Image: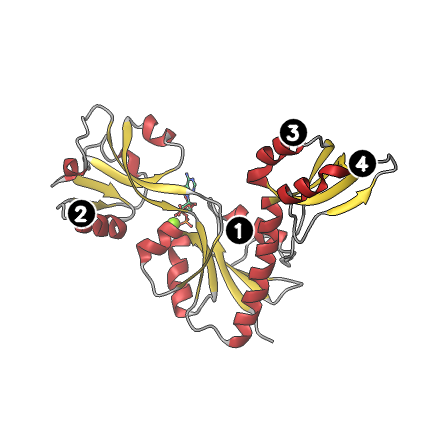
Amino acid sequence: MSTLKLAIQKSGRLSEKSLALLQACGIKLSNGDRKLKTPASNFPIEVLFLRDDDIPQYVEQGVADIGILGENEVWEKAKDVALVSKLGFAQCRLSLAIPRDEPYTGLSFFANKKIATSYPNILEQFFAEQQIPVQIEAIGGSVEIAPGIGLAQAIFDIVSTGSTLQLNGLKEVETVKRSEAVMIGHKGLSQAKQTILDKLLFRMQAVRNAAENKYILLNAPTAVIPQIAYILPGMKSPTILPLQQEGWSSIHSVVKEDEFWDVIDQLKALGAEGILVVPIEKMVN
Ligand code: ATP
Ligand code: MG
């Protein structure tokens, strides 16, 4: 029997969400104490806990078959791996920031300036494309303090809310890339491993569909069912049940989370009443 080896971050911003994703897919890890390796008890998968920096290399070499990490780290390491799926969490941007009091005049501001970053490769590529010469100061962390201590005149770093920049007297002036957590895979997985990966992806899709959809139940005059069925097509078509009260029906369907409020307004306008909306745990199309 084959086992798929999945690398996730040992401890950091992605660890909890990566484990939560496995859990939502019904995968139980036999011990939760994050040894280097932990097999699942009910799925042919083994989890390796690593630093996120090392994951692209492990996946390229096939020491791990798949890995979960920030896209930013995938770009920076530029290893030969496949992008399997975007995961929709850990959204952040990679941005250029400068001291708050400096007037910003556009990208030419950076010409011949020193920029501190933990992402030298991404930054180098960006300024090469812009044909602007810059000096890149690669440092391991705490990039935001670099201008304050005189190491650089600007920084290039991960930003989500911008509060770290603000605390350090900096302002974000350019967004270079947007990143989120992704799954990467070894190129040339065996057929057996690919089959396990497909099973995992199928489960992940069901979890994702469920999070993006709600189950909706409502009462409406039987006469407006065609209009409601048009607004709420559901997975195939809505379920219609007669109410005991003559001329009324109960309608059950599925609605997308992001269309939800628009749909509710339309339903009310058609005379719908007693609208219930409930979460879905798993959804298989
Ligand atoms: P490791 O010890 O594994 O090398 P790290 O310190 O490099 O960890 P973390 O700070 O835990 O990394 O961040 C991991 C990933 O989470 C980043 O590569 C990025 O994709 C994402 N991330 C980082 N900061 C944020 C943020 N503020 N908001 C959202 N996502 C973020
Ligand atoms: Mg790291």
| Tag of residue 55 | none
For the N terminus, the image quarter is bottom right
| Marks 2 and 1 in Cβ contact (< 8 Å) | no
State the residue in front, 219 or 106: 219
**What residue does disc 2 label?**
130
Question: Nearer the viewer's eye, disc 1 or disc 4?
Answer: 4
What amino acid type should be assigned to the residue bearing mark 2?
Answer: Gln
Q: In this orientation, which residue lies closer to the viewer: 239 or 171? A: 239
Q: Are there few (<14), some (14-19), or many (20+) residues within 10 Å of tag 2? A: few
Q: Which residue is mark 3?
A: 269
Q: Nearer the viewer, residue 206 or 231?
A: 231
Spatial distance from mark 2 to mark 3, Cα to Cα? 53 Å
Which element carries disc 4, helix, strand or loop? Answer: strand
Q: Which residue is mark 1?
A: 18
For the residues labelled 1 and 4, the Cα–Cα distance comes to 46 Å
- Upstream in sequence: badge 4 or badge 3: 4
Q: Amino acid at mark 3?
A: Ala
Q: Is residue 229 left or right of residue 103?
A: right
Say which of marks 2 and 1 sits in front: 2
Which residue bears the numbered disc 4? Answer: 248
Q: CA distance from mark 4 to mark 3?
A: 16 Å
Mark with earlier residue (2, 1): 1
Q: In 3D space, how far apart are the residues under numbered discs 1 and 3 (Cα atoms)?
A: 42 Å
Residue in view at x 38 percent, y 29 percent: 163
